[in-house]
């Protein structure tokens, strides 16, 4: 699988889906109310998804796309190229192809972007360092394992002990 016609990895959020295509480009579709599509738009700065308008259950227009939208890097580096992806409710994170670093976008109301504010484009998480090997998402949190024998790192909502740490223990990143 090396073309845009196939998917290497897929994740499903609450009202959106993302995939790493065979050419390593990341695409998302569905709701974009909190920047889940990663194309620089959100409910405050709507994108031009006019051909793919969606209607919410209340009858109002919402920002979304029924077709895949390419995720862009916040640093101006163009499209995000990745090897794997994970979704939470309204946030996505991907392992960048060349560096193994984590890039995330979407909602950050529970710390899903590791201390950064919400992001409508993929931003590198500076406090998730090392060569990430696996990346997983839960309702409002993510965890990663690394190539070096370091302990896994988790970030986001730990209100139910999802990180597997005793109450009051330091949380990384």
Image (cartoon, grey):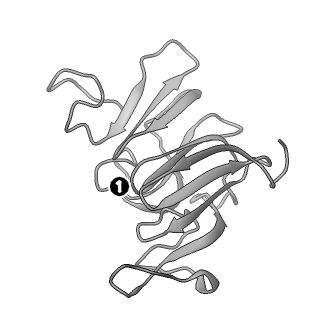
Residue at figure coordinates x 85%, y 44% from the top left: 2
Residue holding disc 1: 108
Residue at figure coordinates x 58%, y 67% from the top left: 39
Residue toward you, 106 or 74: 106
Indicate the quadrant where residue 166 lies: top left
* For residue 127, above or below residue 58: above
Badge 1: how crowded within 10 Å, few (<14), some, or many (20+)? Answer: many
* For residue 11, above or below residue 62: above
Find residue 108 and report its horizontal and vertical position in percent: 35, 55
Callout 1: SS: loop
Indicate the quadrant where residue 147 lies: top right
Location of the N terminus (image quadrant)? top right
Residue toward you, 79 or 59: 59
Q: 7 left or right of 168?
A: right
Give the total number of marks visible in the rendering: 1
* For residue 148, above or below residue 44: above
Q: 38 left or right of 152?
A: right
The residue furthest top is 149
Residue at figure coordinates x 36%, y 79% from the top left: 57
Q: 57 left or right of 94?
A: left
Q: 60 left or right of 32?
A: left
Residue at figure coordinates x 43%, y 37% from the top left: 127
Find residue 146 and report its horizontal and vertical position in percent: 53, 22
Location of the C terminus (image quadrant)? top left
Indicate the quadrant where residue 43 lies: bottom left
Find residue 48 and report its horizontal and vertical position in percent: 59, 83
Find residue 8 and report its horizontal and vertical position in percent: 71, 42
The residue furthest front is 57
* For residue 14, above or below residue 96: below
The residue furthest left is 167
């Amino acid at each position: 699988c090396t073309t845009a016609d196939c998917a290497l990895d897929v994740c499903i959020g609450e009202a959106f889906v993302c995939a790493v295509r065979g050419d390593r480009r990341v695409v998302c579709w569905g709701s974009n109310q909190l920047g889940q599509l990663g194309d620089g738009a959100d409910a405050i700065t709507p994108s031009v998804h006019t051909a793919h308008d969606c209607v919410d259950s209340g009858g109002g227009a919402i920002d979304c796309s029924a077709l895949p939208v390419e995720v862009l890097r916040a640093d101006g580096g163009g499209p995000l190229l990745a090897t794997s992806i994970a979704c939470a409710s309204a946030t996505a994170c991907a392992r960048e192809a060349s560096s193994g670093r984590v890039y995330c976008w979407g909602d950050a109301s529970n710390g899903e972007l590791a201390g950064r504010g919400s992001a409508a484009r993929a931003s590198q998480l500076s406090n998730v360092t090392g060569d990430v090997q696996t990346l997983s998402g839960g309702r409002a949190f993510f965890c990663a394992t690394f190539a070096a024998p370091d302990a896994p790192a988790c970030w986001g909502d730990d209100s139910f002990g999802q990180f597997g740490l005793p109450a009051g223990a330091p949380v990384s990143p």
